[in-house]
Image (cartoon, rainbow, N blue to C red):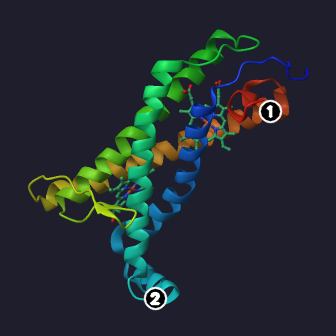
Amino acid sequence: MSAPAPSAPVYPLVQRTLHWLVALCLLALLPLGFYIEGYETEAVEAANAALGPGGFDLLYALHKSFGLTVLGLMVLRVVARAAMGEPAYARPLSRPLRLASHSVHMLLYALLILTPIVGWIGVSAYPAPADFWFVADLALPIAPNRELSETLLEDVHAPLAILLMILALAHVLAALKHRFIDRDEVMGRMIGR
Ligand code: HEM
Ligand code: HEM
């Protein structure tokens, strides 16, 4: 156990900001995704009763808007990561830990890009609008194909999202372990101190 070194390297502000914006979006996306899934009559009625007519469709539009926002943020993140790399560790992690952490981070990047792309193609093929914050319908110009849409949304988008959720949870627990059990500088790399 030791106090964080005052000069411990941190991620540049732009990467920290993108990290936390994506994390916030996920916090909204996952519950919305599970709520809208399957267009269940009970869920539709409850949302319309609570939010007024069109309430359920509003939740759908919000899920898609947050999802497309994550995709946009991730494009910026990949560019930022490629341009700025990652800061050195104040105290190098052990090789297996480094490998595990790097693999989870890269898998998270992949899932945060693939999951929204599959959702996007899925709704476009339905064909349904790909709402973007009530200002645009970003549906892709692809031929309507209900079967493809349902396969993509149910058999690909949902499992990817669930895997993403599990990995994100493991990631958060690992970060908290660094902070409160190991008491090292790892969490500081992303909170900026
Ligand atoms: C990182 C981004 C995203 C995450 C983490 C995410 C997550 C989820 C989750 C957890 C579900 C419920 C899955 C289930 O149990 O069946 C879901 C459903 C859904 N998502 Fe996403 N989503 C994302 C992006 C998008 C985008 C960009 C779109 C479309 C533009 C989209 C469209 C849908 C639709 C239409 C459903 C409901 C499918 C059904 O009715 O079975 N998602 N999403
Ligand atoms: C309370 C929530 C969270 C905490 C405390 C947290 C903490 C951290 C920390 C400390 C790092 C730097 C690790 C290192 O450099 O060794 C990091 C990196 C990262 N986090 Fe999180 N995180 C959280 C939520 C999330 C969520 C929800 C996601 C997305 C699913 C995510 C995705 C990532 C990715 C992809 C990296 C690697 C960044 C890079 O190297 O470019 N994090 N996080």
Residue shown at 24% from the left, 54% from the top:
122
Tell me the kind of residue under disc 1. Answer: Arg
- Residue 114 x, y percent position in the rendering: 35, 40
Q: Quadrant of residue 181?
A: top right
Q: Which quadrant contains ligand 2?
A: top right
Q: Which mark is residue 179?
A: 1
Q: How many numbered marks does the figure carry?
A: 2
Residue indicated by mark 2: 52
- Residue 142 x, y percent position in the rendering: 12, 52
Reading the chain from its start, which is encountered first: label 2 or label 1?
2
Residue shown at 70% from the left, 24% from the top:
10
Residue behind label 1 places its C-beta within 8 angstroms of ligand 2: yes
Q: Nearer the viewer, residue 38 or 51?
A: 51
Residue 178 in view in this figure: yes
Residue 111 in view in this figure: no
Give the side of residue 65 with respect to residue 140, left or right: right
Vertical arrangement, residue 180 with respect to residue 122, above or below: above
**Quick one: which residue is furthest to the right in this view?**
2
Tell me the kind of residue under disc 2. Answer: Gly
Q: Quadrant of the C terminus?
A: top right
Mark 1 burial class by Cα count in 10 Å: few <14, some 14-19, many 20+: some
